[in-house]
Amino acid sequence: MDILVIGGGGREHAICWALAKSPKADKIYCAPGNAGIGQIAELVSIQVGEFERLVAFAEEMKVGLVVVGPDDPLADGIVDAFEAKHIPVFGPRKNAAHIEGSKTFMKDLLHKYNIPTAAYEKFDNYEAALSYLHSQPVPIVIKADGLAAGKGVTVAFTREEAEDALQSIMVDKVFGESGSQVVIEEFLAGQEMSILSFVDDEVVRPMAAAQDHKQVYDNDKGPNTGGMGTYSPLPHIADRIIEEAVETIIKPTAKAMVAEGRPFRGILFAGLMITPDGKPKTIEFNARFGDPETQVVLPRLKSDLLEIFLAAVNGTLDQVEIEWSDEAAVCVVLASGGYPASYPKGLPIHGLQDVEQEQSLVFHAGTAKNAEGEWVTNGGRVLGVVGLGKDIADARDKAYATANQISFEGKHNRSDIAMKALR
């Protein structure tokens, strides 16, 4: 069957790459995609928010499955738009994607169903939020309620940082209407962990666990980004803790969504913190594949991704065998100088043509081709370089060896991705 993947980043490149391995996949379209994705899929110049055009394209091309990558179109109801035309689509409907689209909804849901998460309060009034903030200890966490491209969360280690975050979200409106409400929650110390799951109503099939590195600089310093690197598996986190997270957090959340009349079908992404007492708690839920978690999880998937998607869409996810490789994967993100603030575009990328694909994978997040046909930068996160190896150390060596072969003016990457697993 022909497939339409919606989105244009490193996550969508990894999804297209995994789907292309399926014997059932014929032509893959990607809207809008990027230059790197264009090497394995036909690019369609329709933006992710143009629902009518996307639906019309899928109808015209008789697409057998649509896969939605980013959060914004899911929150805006793109799945509902395809379903209205009886086009098979993988992803949650608008009312289910609300678990990512509203932090207050998510926190209230977890509280109602006694699912472990940090203590919190929610506010739609700046003065009330500021007054509450002054009564709380630091560190403390400030979150914009709505979607903010992965940048709407501030972990404030001083009261001044907390006040600045609240001011920028609620008064300066740096995230627009996404900041009309905020969640202020207790700071959780410990190890972060991401578990993505294929979900079909109450059926939950967890993927291999991963860990993201959000801050832009080494040793988790600097502002939050969309993610500077990931790795999987997590040898330093016991299997029983991962199983506990699935049983006490992810499965109960899927059941809670059904109970609320918001059955979830798609990828449910749990961002978790393992506290010093060894107990997992929920930091956040996302309603789609993570970026750059996808870039390390899908290369470890031995089963046919297309078959899994179709099973979820058809309500037969519980009947599918899902196998994972014992290989380790480490992703190092190469970012533009200045990211996550302003950064230049159109800078030539050198060394891409010399990368040996057997050694590592390179997923394109923000690239383009210029008039001369050369690779150039076209985003904040430019490339995700993934090393695969027998263990984390081996995969890490391969990822950095390849990352060092690639250069562009102002290139920035963290040098400590996956070190937490090796200490």
Image: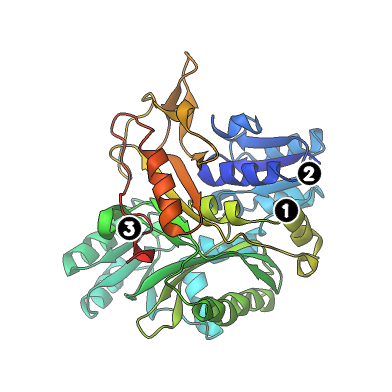
- Whichever of labels 1 and 3 marks the residue nearer the N terminus, that label is 3
On the image, the x and y values in percent for residue 315 come to 80, 65
Which residue ends up furthest to the top in the rendered image? 372
Q: Compared to 104, does 147 lie above or below?
A: above
Query: CA separation, marks 2 and 3?
Result: 47 Å
In the displayed structure image, the side of residue 69 where residue 141 appears, left or right:
left
- Whichever of labels 2 and 3 marks the residue nearer the N terminus, that label is 2
Residue 149 appears in the figure: no
Q: In which quarter of the image is the C terminus?
A: bottom left
Q: Do the residues labelled 2 and 1 touch (CB within 8 Å)?
A: yes
On the image, the x and y values in percent for residue 343 come to 31, 35
On the image, the x and y values in percent for residue 130 come to 25, 71
Label 1: which secondary element: loop
Residue under numbered circle 2: 23
- Whichever of labels 2 and 1 marks the residue nearer the N terminus, that label is 2
Residue under numbered circle 3: 169
